[in-house]
């Protein structure tokens, strides 16, 4: 099992539409070209309002985040979750290993555009 300590997080910015299911793709985590085995790990992604810094949505393993044994992180927000968002947000994705060591994998902004069809 890999110990994740000193690798810098990647800045990844996203755009999405309010009321749409959001599946931005996967993130593949490796250390020295070896996929991280996420067995027993937890993950948390807080999405915070860019102005007030209040938490608008939290995703975790089993609730929007999936971690695989071959280093793949999958993130999904439902249409109901994105319907509650509008405007600009900041986020980070933090992974905690089985030794309780935490590492931020990605961070950045999420811009949510108002949806015309469902309004």
Image (cartoon, helix red, strand yellow):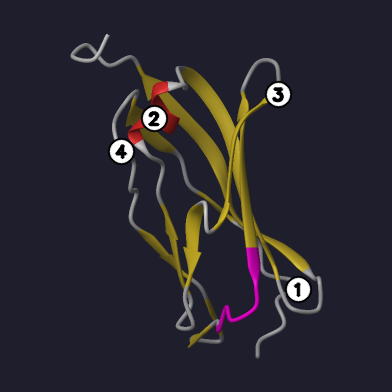
- Tell me how far mark 2 sits from mark 1, CA to CA: 35 Å
- Tell me how far mark 4 sits from mark 2, CA to CA: 8 Å
Q: Earlier in the sequence, mark 1 or mark 4?
A: 1
Q: Badge 4 local density, few (<14 within 10 Å), some, or many (20+)?
A: some
Q: Nearer the viewer, mark 2 or mark 3?
A: 2
- Tell me how far mark 3 sits from mark 1, CA to CA: 27 Å
Of 10 and 22, the residue lying toward us: 22
Q: Which residue is mark 2?
A: 80
- Tell me how far mark 1 sits from mark 4, CA to CA: 33 Å
Q: Badge 3 local density, few (<14 within 10 Å), some, or many (20+)?
A: few
Looking at the magenta stretch, what is its main secondary structure? loop
Q: Are marks 3 and 1 in contact (CB under 8 Å)?
A: no
Q: Is residue 34 left or right of residue 39?
A: left
Q: Nearer the viewer, mark 1 or mark 4?
A: 4
Quarter of the image that includes the C terminus: top left
Q: Which residue is mark 4?
A: 21
Q: Which mark is residue 5?
A: 1
Residue drawn at point x = 59 percent, y = 81 percent: 39
Q: Nearer the viewer, mark 2 or mark 1?
A: 2
């Amino acid at each position: 099992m890999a110990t994740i300590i000193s690798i810098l997080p990647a800045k990844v910015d996203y755009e999405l539409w309010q009321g749409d299911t959001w599946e931005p793709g996967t993130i593949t985590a490796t250390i020295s070209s070896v996929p991280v085995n996420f067995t027993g790990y937890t993950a948390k992604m807080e999405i915070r309002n860019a102005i007030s810094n209040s938490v608008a949505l939290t995703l975790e393993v089993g609730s929007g985040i999936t971690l695989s044994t071959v280093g793949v992180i999958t993130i999904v927000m439902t249409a109901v979750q994105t319907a509650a968002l509008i405007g600009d947000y900041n986020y980070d994705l933090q992974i905690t290993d089985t030794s309780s060591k935490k590492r931020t994998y990605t961070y950045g902004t999420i811009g949510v555009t108002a949806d015309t069809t469902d309004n």
